Image (tube, grey):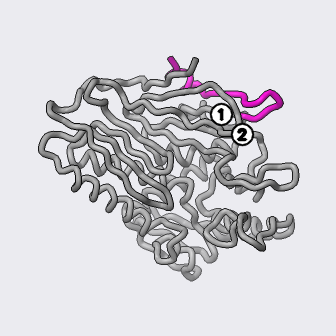
Amino acid sequence: MRDVIVPLAIDEALPPGGSTLFKADGRTMGTGWSARMMLPPGADGAAVERALQAELDEIVAQMSHWDNASLLARYNRAPAGSWHALPPQFYEVADYALQVAQDSGGAYDPAAGELVTLWGFGSSARYDQNGFRTPDALTIGALLARRSERQPLLDRVNRRLLQPGGATLDFSSVAKGYAVDRMAACLEARSVRHFVVEAGGELRGAGVKDNGEPWWVEIESVPDGQARQAVVALHGLAIATSGDYRQYFEHGAQRASHTLDPRSGQPVANNVASVTVLAATCMAADALSTALTVLGPKDGLAFADARGIAARFLVRDADGLRESVSAAWSRMQQ
């Protein structure tokens, strides 16, 4: 038996007559992307595929922490006191990410790039490379003390960002979800309104297939644990999962996951194996799944319920994986 998750609001409109299923794919952000869509008559599938790739390439040019020429990398290197005008995409991500940081009391922080690098999950000095050593308490404490003075300031009126000196942005927990949203917007701008798009496992869907069925997707499972299977109808919904099994190394008796708690400077150690979030946008699902992982099953569920967030926690205990879901998630279960 498996859980079935469906949206509360259903649009019964079918694809235009004569629509055909078209598939597109490519590479972005070190991973793959794909799209399945009901292409209206006369639409040029190859042109749509090129437009999707161009949309993703622009996100990389602005937000990649692997590309030294990206806007994000240039901001991180910029001198103290410099202001940086932001293009619409970068501004939208920075605005949302900084708001989640504030709402979560710092459990989520897009300016924790220095901490990410310290623990070996950045673009250099990685945990899986020779010579890596886990940071000691003194080093972590010094970094946390510095970060209080290195928080970027977003000028929402003029859409610019202040580099206070040493602020290190890392959008890896939000940019991929945002890229999926830009793919959706790209399709909708071309009158393609029935689709499912994906990048690196983050997905967003709209409309239905030609037979009226929604775009069914399986919710990502924890590879080293057993939990009830679940599928979701991606009809006007996006989904993202944060898990401790993606990038990690063993640190003493603990699993040092790539999900770090910016408040303590340590990898999360609350036994959360994964958090899945359903939201209207993939940017929100992506960022919130990370924030809820850091907050943990108790505070995270309280945070989700207070804000109407549909979230599913899988928590490791002596008996395997224990599932906890928010009220908004429960309302969509069939």
Question: Is residue 71 in view from this perspective?
Answer: yes
Residue occupying the far left of the picture: 42
Total labels drawn: 2
Q: In this figure, which residue is indicated by the disc labeled 2? A: 272
Residue span colored magenta: 315-334
What type is the residue that disc 2 sits on? Val
Q: Residue 202, relative to residue 147: is it above or below?
A: above
Asked if marks 1 and 2 touch (Cβ < 8 Å), the reply is yes
Return the residue nearer the eye: 35 or 152: 35
Query: Where 274 falls versus 256 (above or below)?
Result: above
| Residue type, mark 1 in image | Phe
Residue 27 percent coordinates (x, y): 42, 59
Q: Position of residue 7 (x, y in %)?
A: 43, 26
Q: Position of residue 224 (x, y in %)?
A: 70, 39
Image: 102 above or below 316:
below
Identify the residue shown where x is 38% and y is 44%: 197
Which mark identifies residue 69?
none
Please give the residue where the numbered disc 1 appears in the rendered image.
313
